[in-house]
């Protein structure tokens, strides 16, 4: 989610091979707990508690939520936390500096204090104001060691066995200046389901950035969206590089937050944001999570990877993109099902462009080249470097999946089709068209920049004619904001009838999800109930080839009045709630998830 590639990407990547050892069999009978940083007393509670401000105002913006500055109270007692069960990796490593470094650190801290004082003289944009961006149930939570035997209402279907994992942004330290929702440290929430019983845990992804900042006792890496705008953004970049030069921080080991997407590929659970390499996680036999380390696909990937790689359901191959603010702006690559990477294919773009997502068909990749671009010179003019460029032509590129270079790419212009996410695409040979299903967002950059216009995200069918080079767009559900979601992943790249999408109203909250018939436009709704909100609905297919909608929707739902979080499991055929799992602690609204089948869990330890 967070385009930290603005300045912090490094071209040198290292792989952490310190893999923890686990038994090969899984058992849910044992109880495991460990210690959160706060409960250990390693960090003051104030480090993750937002300051109260006296002049609370109801503010409207693209990422508006109620201006509640306190963390909601936890309605459950925390489980007993013992130091013995604390993963070794969460013990902070205090940096050892020489005298020159100590002096430099002190001087740079003074510079930062002066910079902060200057920043606080002016009101923050709504898209950078932490009192808006991480208010209410967007606020972070401490880690939750695994809790077993959770209360279940209804019956979890027999065929649902495995682990539902969902990523999200969860700032480890209290923001002291600008902070955008996408800037938070990655935290993964996991519900393990085994023969109708459920357990839950959530853990920070131990990114290099998080590990360094924890050792330093505070945030020091720039926040790509919340901080890097205008002159103070330039000053923060200079400050960061001065600290790098002095050896106080090391961005060469990675600067990403790994907070956006999750994919399970070739026996690896990967947490991703588009500003870094993925991070490999492991789900322990007890249902807890650990971070193995930054994952370069065995030293094959030497650039960032976006958080929405695509796995072809037939071949098992993984397709990905990497974008940067420096040339080459965009690269395409893929991995065989056993993890062998193809050479990079450079996709030539005129300007560096945000490419959060793309699509695959049976034979092609579909790459958006739209109008949200990076213009670093905008910082000198005092603005955000992520902006909408109306003068740029919006288009999609269609490239054969196994192309050795981009000479065969067909570009099709497509005005007014900025999609932050694409849900699916397929080929219709009879009309020489590629059909793309996405949610077209207006204003296109309103997630990143203040706008007076209310954000709209309209589910649309975009047809790209490869013969004529023309495109059409048809709104499938014109009057609803439909955002995060998916189609049946076993049919990705093939014609699908149904899509399951978050009903993103009141934006940015999600009050339910829609099952949309892409052929007829019929919409069936599942609402979470008064005061209840969720996020991305995850569709777990359980049917064969015949029944596309046979499966279950899983979604974390939070009751804002009672401050209770739960996992809902909904039958995708009739939208009947099959089971509700009551969770032991609050689950903030987050981003994307996946489901790792029980039979696949042991693959994590094979190599
Ligand atoms: Fe996303």
Image (cartoon, rainbow, N blue to C red):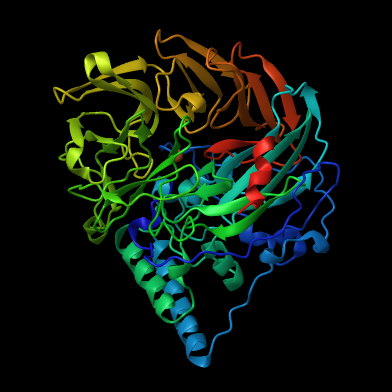
Q: Image check: 478 left or right of 513?
A: left
Residue at x 54%, y 22% (from the top left corner): 513
Q: Quadrant of ligand 1?
A: top left
Residue at x 55%, y 32% (from the top left corner): 535
Picture coordinates of residue 158 (x, y %)? 74, 23
- Near-viewer residue (405 or 3): 405
Question: Is residue 52 visible to the viewer in this orientation of the structure?
Answer: no
Give the answer, above or below, for where 392 lies relative to 537: below
Picture coordinates of residue 81 (x, y %)? 82, 56
Residue farthest toward the bottom in the current orientation of the protein: 99
Give the answer, above or below, for where 590 lies relative to 470: below
Give the answer, above or below, for where 347 lies relative to 361: below
Picture coordinates of residue 379 (x, y %)? 27, 58
Picture coordinates of residue 490 (x, y %)? 51, 26
Q: Which of the 4 image quarters holds residue 89?
A: bottom right
Residue at x 39%, y 60% (from the top left corner): 302
Q: Quadrant of the C terminus?
A: bottom right
């Amino acid at each position: 989610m967070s385009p930290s590639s603005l300045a912090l990407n490094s071209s040198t990547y290292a792989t952490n091979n310190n893999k923890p050892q686990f038994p090969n069999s899984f058992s849910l009978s044992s109880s495991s707990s460990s210690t959160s940083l706060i409960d250990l007393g390693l960090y003051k509670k104030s480090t993750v508690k937002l300051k109260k401000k006296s002049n609370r105002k109801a503010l409207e913006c693209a990422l508006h939520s109620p201006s509640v500055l306190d963390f909601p109270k936890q309605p459950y007692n925390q489980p007993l936390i013992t130091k013995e069960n604390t993963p070794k990796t969460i013990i902070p490593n205090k940096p050892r500096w020489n005298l020159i470094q100590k002096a430099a650190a002190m001087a740079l801290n003074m510079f930062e204090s002066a910079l902060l004082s200057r920043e606080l003289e002016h009101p923050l944009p709504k898209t950078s104001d932490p009192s808006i961006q991480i208010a209410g149930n967007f606020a972070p939570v401490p880690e939750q060691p695994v809790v077993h035997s959770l209360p279940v209402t209804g019956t979890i279907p027999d065929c649902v066995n495995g682990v539902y994992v969902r990523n999200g942004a969860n700032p480890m330290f209290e923001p002291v200046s600008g902070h955008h929702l996408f800037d938070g440290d990655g935290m993964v929430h996991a519900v393990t389901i085994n023969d109708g019983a459920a357990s839950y845990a959530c853990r920070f992804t131990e990114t290099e950035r998080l590990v360094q900042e924890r050792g330093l006792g505070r945030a020091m890496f720039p926040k790509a969206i919340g901080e890097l705008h205008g002159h103070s953004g330039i000053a923060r970049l200079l400050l960061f590089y001065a600290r790098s030069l002095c050896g106080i921080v090391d961005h060469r080991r990675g600067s990403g937050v790994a907070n956006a997407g999750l994919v399970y590929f070739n026996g690896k659970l990967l947490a991703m944001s588009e500003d870094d390499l993925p991070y490999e996680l492991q789900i322990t036999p007890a249902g807890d999570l650990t971070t193995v380390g930054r994952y370069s696909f065995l030293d094959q990937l030497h650039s960032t990877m976006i958080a929405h790689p695509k796995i072809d359901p037939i071949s098992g191959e993984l397709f990905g993109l990497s974008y940067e603010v420096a040339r080459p702006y965009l690269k395409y690559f893929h991995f065989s099902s056993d993890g062998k990477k193809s050479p990079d294919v450079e996709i030539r773009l005129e300007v560096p462009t945000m490419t959060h997502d793309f699509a695959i068909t049976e034979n092609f990749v579909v790459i958006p080249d739209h109008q949200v671009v990076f213009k670093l010179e905008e910082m000198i003019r005092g603005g955000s470097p992520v902006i909408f460029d109306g003068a740029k032509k919006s288009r999609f590129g269609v490239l054969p999946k196994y192309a050795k270079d981009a000479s065969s790419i067909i570009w099709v212009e497509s005005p007014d089709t900025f999609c932050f996410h694409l849900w699916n695409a397929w080929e219709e040979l009879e009309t020489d068209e590629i059909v793309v299903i996405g949610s077209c967002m207006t204003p296109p950059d309103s997630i990143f920049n203040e706008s007076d216009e209310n954000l709209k995200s309209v589910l649309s069918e975009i047809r790209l004619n490869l013969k004529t080079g023309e495109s059409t767009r048809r709104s499938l559900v014109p009057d609803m904001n439909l955002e995060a979601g998916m189609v049946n992943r076993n049919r990705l790249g093939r014609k699908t009838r149904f899509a399951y999408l978050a009903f993103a109203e009141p934006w940015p909250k999600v009050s339910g999800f829609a099952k949309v018939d892409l052929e007829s436009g019929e919409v069936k709704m599942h609402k979470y109930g008064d005061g209840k909100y969720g996020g991305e609905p995850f569709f777990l297919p359980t049917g064969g080839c015949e029944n596309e909608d046979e499966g279950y929707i899983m979604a974390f739902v939070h009751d804002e009045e009672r401050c209770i979080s739960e996992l809902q499991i909904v039958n995708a055929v009739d939208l009947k709630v099959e089971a509700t799992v009551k969770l032991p602690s609050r689950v903030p609204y987050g981003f994307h998830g996946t489901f790792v089948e029980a039979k696949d869990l042991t693959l994590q330890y094979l190599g």
